[in-house]
Image (spheres, grey):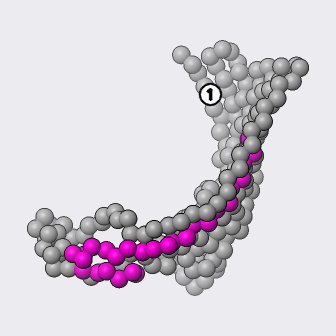
Amino acid sequence: MVSPQVKAILKQYGVQSARYFTNAIATETHGLDIRLNYKHSFEDRGKLKMVASYHRDQTTITDVYPLASILGNQTTTAVLNDTTRSFVETAQPADGYKLWTQFETGTWRSTLNLNRVGSYYYVNGSRFGAKLTTDLDLALQLSKNLEIAVGGNNIFNVLPDKFPETSNLFVSGNGIIQYPPISPYGYNGAFFYIRLNLKL
């Protein structure tokens, strides 16, 4: 529902619809973040670097502000519905950890990244489980200005959970959209590459 004033303004410029941003909600987040860094140099000139991190947090909506009266609809649902509430409060993993390790010796460098994201929930109550993805990169310094590397992201091809199977032909585990668009690491699976770095 739009007020006559807004309709008149839009019609004046030949606009059929419009979208605008608003600070319509207040949120509160409680959580914990931990990060540990470690470095070590070996006698044979090898170098080890490690980073471990963990986070856990929860965001809740504490207040909903009404829209401007000129818009003609000041109901709470005009600002916040089940879908938008889910995006704010449950669609992000509540916890996760990362373990990043890099070892370098001579002209070789290897990097391993383990990234675990916790479970999360979508608007219809669907629960998507925690997953662990693995990235690996192996690099060789051919010269002062040239480096070649091979590697992959999500090398074990871990995919997010699918939507539950329903009669919905569009959004369903057996429909057109099978994976939640809110997945924190996407649903394209493994990605492998060869990289060449040249410094001029």
Give the residue pinned by disc 1: 196
Residue 45 appears in view: yes
Quarter of the figure with residue 60 = bottom right
Residue 91 appears in view: no
Q: Is residue 78 magenta?
A: no
- Foreground residue among 56 and 47: 56
Measuring from the top left, give residue 96's x and y in whole percent: 70, 57
Q: Is residue 65 magenta?
A: yes
Quarter of the figure with residue 187 = bottom right
Q: Residue furthest left?
A: 12
Q: Quadrant of the N terminus?
A: bottom left
Q: Which residues are magenta?
A: 51-77
Q: Residues within 10 Å of mark 1 (few under 14, many from 20)?
A: few
Which amino acid type corresponds to the residue marked 1 in the rendered image? Leu
1 over 13 or under it: above or below: below
Residue shown at the point (78%, 36%) measured from the top left: 38
Measuring from the top left, give residue 56's x and y in whole percent: 68, 60
Residue shown at the point (43%, 69%) measured from the top left: 25
Quarter of the figure with residue 148 = top right
Element type at marker 1?
strand
- Foreground residue among 62 and 8: 62
Q: Residue furthest right?
A: 43
Residue shown at the point (80%, 26%) measured from the top left: 47
Tell me if 196 is positioned left or right of 142 in this view. left
Residue shown at the point (87%, 24%) measured from the top left: 42
Measuring from the top left, give residue 109's x and y in whole percent: 75, 28
Tell me if 13 is positioned left or right of 22 in this view. left
